[in-house]
Image (cartoon, rainbow, N blue to C red):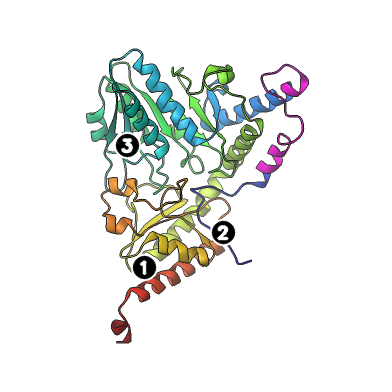
Amino acid sequence: MSEQYYFDHAASAPRRAEVTEAMSRWQHGVVGNPSGSHRAAREARRALEEARDEVASFVGAAPGEVIFTGGGTESCQLAIVGVTNRHRRTHERSEIVISKVEHHAVSDAAEMMARDFENVEVRYVDVDADGVVDLDSLHETLSEATSLVSVMAVNNETGVRQPLDGVNSLAKSSIPGGAVTHTDAVAAAPWLSLPVISASCDLVSICAHKLGGPVNSGALIARNAVAFDAVTPGGGQERGRRGGTVDVAAAVGLAVALRLTDRDLVEVNERVYDYQEKLSSALSFLPGCQITAPNALRVPGTVHVTFEGLASDELLFLLDQRGVCASAAASCSSGAATSSHVLAAMGVSPERSRGSLRLSMGAETTQEEVDRLIAILSSVIFQLRAESTPAEQRAR
């Protein structure tokens, strides 16, 4: 089997061995329902509450503020839909304010609410050429009808960090009583200290599989006694905020992934930052290559580029043939190639956006893999450039 070079951590990180080992206890045989009273149920509940403590510590919250969910998408939907439904009951109009570069987990939930209810509207905040939220645009967008402001901590396509302190300050000071704030911290969690960067946010969404944990495992952190409606009522689990029996194995896997991430955070950041610098420098010399958001503050794990005159699908096909796993932009369920709404919001032309490539690294990435990636990608680019050059020009 040929070598595989995995540069798609932003889509899903490799499962950590410690996570698999910790989850195995809760994936076979008798796994009690944490809501029960017998011994097996008490053991499951103990494991669940220990996991809740770990998640709370990682984000900088109280254990009672942690709501386990089936992943990052459900967590974002619970925040958007739950808060807006509660707001609608006491207001004639409800406006959901989001940035133009949000993940579809946020934007689709907001747009669904606007489709389903005539008194709900989605209002979009502009970003600059690097994809950073324009705080002046946010200030102009806020109104007394604002139900919630949702701005991601780090963009999942470009790795660009957002000014959450500024966002929260405006949301709290510009509206009487302040607006509820939410941040999708899924792309931030592998790289940043969430107790620091998300301290001012009312609601925080995270998931496990971007950290080496299991898929379908996440959490919504609800600070400051924020009131919202359950999207899935029934059963009274998670203090009535999310019905249904919690998957103990998934919660344990999330907790272990967070613990390992926190333990290695400084070392991984320093090492991968060097890889990011080397990779960005090498790619900038390739013909037609442009580094995305070069002036913005970015997390170390992502290098996003565009290639003039090339198409993402042909790039990814040739990279895959040579053992490199990468992506064009955000992951989607269908795998279909669609234009990036993030790059469009940044003002990147459709022609250049067509040749986008996201290379994302993680704790497992090595210097040798980065060196091989540079060599392989360089070979692919020059091959495609040669194939697109007319034969008479190549003969000269």
- Are there few (<14), some (14-19), or many (20+) residues within 10 Å of tag 2? some
> Percent x, y for residue 110?
36, 31
- Are there few (<14), some (14-19), or many (20+) residues within 10 Å of tag 3? many
- Please state the extent of the stretch shown in magenta in the rendering: 19-41
Task: From the image, state whether disc 2 or disc 3 is nearer to you.
Answer: 3
In the image, is residue 265 above or below residue 39? below
Identify which residue, 166 or 137, lies in the foreground: 137
Q: Which residue lies under the disc numbered 2? A: 366
- The quadrant of the rendering that contains the C terminus is bottom left
Separation of residues labelled 3 and 1 (CA atoms): 32 Å
Q: Which of marks 1 and 2 is nearer the N terminus?
A: 1
Separation of residues labelled 1 and 2 (CA atoms): 22 Å
Q: Image point 59% across, 17% down: which residue? A: 235
Does residue 57 appear to the left or right of 169 in the view shown?
A: right
Residue 174: quarter of image: top left
Residue 13 visible to an observer of this rendering: yes
Q: Circle 1 sits in a helix, a strand or a loop, which is it?
A: loop
Q: Earlier in the sequence, mark 3 or mark 1?
A: 3
Identify which amino acid the numbered label 1 is placed on. Answer: Phe
Identify which amino acid the numbered label 3 is placed on. Answer: Ser
Q: Is 27 within the magenta?
A: yes
> Percent x, y for residue 215?
57, 40
Numbered-mark total: 3
Q: Image point 42% across, 48% down: which residue? A: 330
In the image, is residue 396 above or below residue 79? below
Q: Which residue lies under the disc numbered 1? A: 285
Identify the disc placed on residue 99. 3
Q: Are marks 1 and 2 in contact (CB under 8 Å)?
A: no
Q: Circle 3 sits in a helix, a strand or a loop, which is it?
A: strand
Does residue 94 appear to the left or right of 366 in the view shown?
A: left
